[in-house]
Image (cartoon, rainbow, N blue to C red):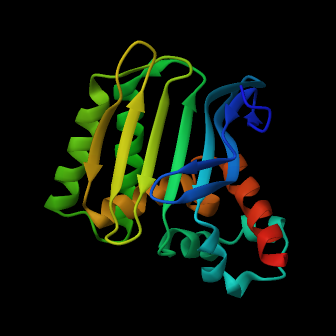
Amino acid sequence: MSSDMVLVDGIPFPPEITTTKPLPLFGTGLTDIEVHFLQIKYNAIGVYLEETVAEHLGNWKGKKGCELAENDDFFEAIVSAPVEKCIRIVVIKEIKGSQYGVQLESGVRDRLAAVDKYEEEEEEALEKITEFFQSKYFKTDSVITFHFSATPLTAEISFVTEGKGESKIKVENANVVEMIQKWYLGGTRGVSQSTVKNLAEKLAEKLAA
């Protein structure tokens, strides 16, 4: 294992991945819940963004990371920035893919409904994503990757688990793609607050440089 890997709860993430261009790691965190004072960790998360994302965040220069973490407008600007983004998720606690698919569908559908953008096309796109995860089993160390292109706004979702080849699905409904980003990068409403806080701190440093 390369020594420059970034460890998230002991799970290695490369400091940079290359899609059509190099995307540096800008934020890391976990999805977890606390049950009877025990922290149950589900996934480790890495957020990769184009360096040029900072050019779209000029309004927040000079702000501290802790301020940005509480500012949903800041994360709205990250999501709407026309740059490539990649979210890499590594499974810590085994679950059925169908469980993850239902959580994703519910989170995205609720966000779409809240802004009155949940129509037949969005429903169909979400159903395909749910079907994609339906047959999967998320063993520990399985990797789910969401790769978001900038223009047009599309997403490629890939899944890799031990002993099986990579499987992929393309999502071309821009409303659904936007809300998948917001599920993970939605500021105070994001599914992983540790990721949101870490991303805010790293971007605050980038904006101060």
Q: Look at the image and tell me in which quarter the C terminus lies.
A: bottom right
Query: Which residue appears farthest toward the bottom when viewing the image?
Result: 59
Q: Residue at 39% of width from left, 32% of height from top?
A: 159
Q: Position of residue 181 (x, y in %)?
A: 47, 58
Query: Which residue appears farthest toward the top when viewing the image?
Result: 163
Quarter location, residue 66: bottom right
Pick the front one: 15 or 197: 15
Quarter location, residue 202: bottom right
Q: Residue at 57% of width from left, 76% of height from top?
A: 77
Q: Is residue 28 left or right of residue 97?
A: right
Q: Is residue 37 left or right of residue 182?
A: right
Image position of 131 with respect to 104: above or below: above
Q: Residue at 59% of width from left, 61% of height from top?
A: 49
Q: Position of residue 188 (x, y in %)?
A: 64, 60
Pick the front one: 44 or 145: 145
Image position of 90 with respect to 29: above or below: above
Quarter location, residue 60: bottom right
Q: Look at the image and tell me in which quarter the N terminus lies.
A: top right
Q: Position of residue 40 (x, y in %)?
A: 67, 24
Q: Residue at 25% of width from left, 61% of height from top?
A: 173
